Image (cartoon, rainbow, N blue to C red):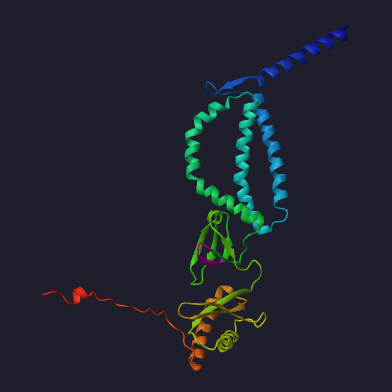
Amino acid sequence: MPFQLKEIEEKITDSSAWEKINTVLNAHYDFSDGISISVKDVLVIITVIFLTTLLLKLIFRILTKKLPEADKTKFNVVFGYFRWLVYVVILLITLHAVGVNVTAVFAASAALLIGIGLALQTLFQDIIAGVLILLDQTIHVGDIIEIDGKIGRVEEVKLRTTRAVTRDNRVLIIPHHLYLTNSLYNWTQNGSTTREGVSVGVAYGSDVQLVKKLLLQAALSHDMVLKHPAPTVFFDDFGESSLDFRVMFTTNDSFQAVFPKSDIRFEIDRLFREHNISIPFPQRDIHIIQNTSEANPKE
């Protein structure tokens, strides 16, 4: 009999302890008329955030599995912004699930969120474009790119911008959002060699076979022009004032292509002068019609 009384007392004590714990867990704290939260809700939120953190780490490892080590660091910064956005969304969903009126939270911060969103719109575009560049490896350090009529050699790919150096040794800072609205030309993605060309017009009646021979000679005379594949001459068109030709050649340094192109033009001019081949300039015939009534006015 005493043993049974002891068990009953323990059960009553345990029941009383659980009631106290439940009372503490279910105690609500009012922050405003529409926002009230309990200790149990806080524990639920902490658990959800912890599970979300584990899931985000797993996603990060999957996305960066094949990225170079240098790009992983850059992507980690980008992923940090995404991580905080996910936390905010998960927090709001969890608050709504535990009975908190999230509409009041949105109403209190709506104006602030709209202002921040408008101010950071371009920044977010740069970051999103930077993420795409890192993931699909569109641009690498050392690539020669052309965008919006500007040409540069890539020196550094950052999170928000690409840093390149132009041919005249000026630093070109390219915001990544320009990649979303402009065509990007990567001259060296298919290899280090590129095809270049020099156009020239000769007078009608010139020996076109001799012109072709001299153009090939001028191209092959330059050290930066590769012998294989060999240069090629195209007869482009019968122009208004000239026969239009174009010599195409391959170089292994397209960033410095302006120099061999200039030298080849000098050589073409010299060879044409030696062989009496003239480069015409546009000519127009002007007919002046005189008004006879004004030339011989009546007296």
> At 63% from the left edge and 43% from the top edge, which residue is drawn?
83
Q: Quadrant of the C terminus?
A: bottom left
Quadrant hosting residue 297: bottom left
Residue pictured at 53% horizontal, 83% vertical: 264
Q: Nearest the camera: 293 or 176?
A: 293
Position of residue 201 measured from the top left corner of the image (x, y, whole percent): 49, 81
Establish if 173 lies above or below 54: below
Q: Residue at x 67, y 24 (%)?
A: 40
- Identify the residue at the far front of this view: 298
- Depth check: give the residue in front, 234 or 93: 234
- What is the magenta segment's predominant secondary structure? strand
Percent x, y of residue 279: 46, 85
Q: Nearer the viewer, residue 41 or 235?
A: 235
The span picked out in magenta is 147-153
The vertical placement of 209 against 100, above or below, is below
Quarter assignment of residue 214:
bottom right
Toward which corner of the image does residue 294 lie, by quadrant?
bottom left
Instruction: Give the residue furthest to the bottom.
Output: 274
User: Closest to the observer: 222 or 291?
Assistant: 291
Q: Residue at x 54, y 78 (%)?
A: 198
Residue 158: percent from left, percent from top = 57, 57
Q: Quadrant of the N terminus?
A: top right
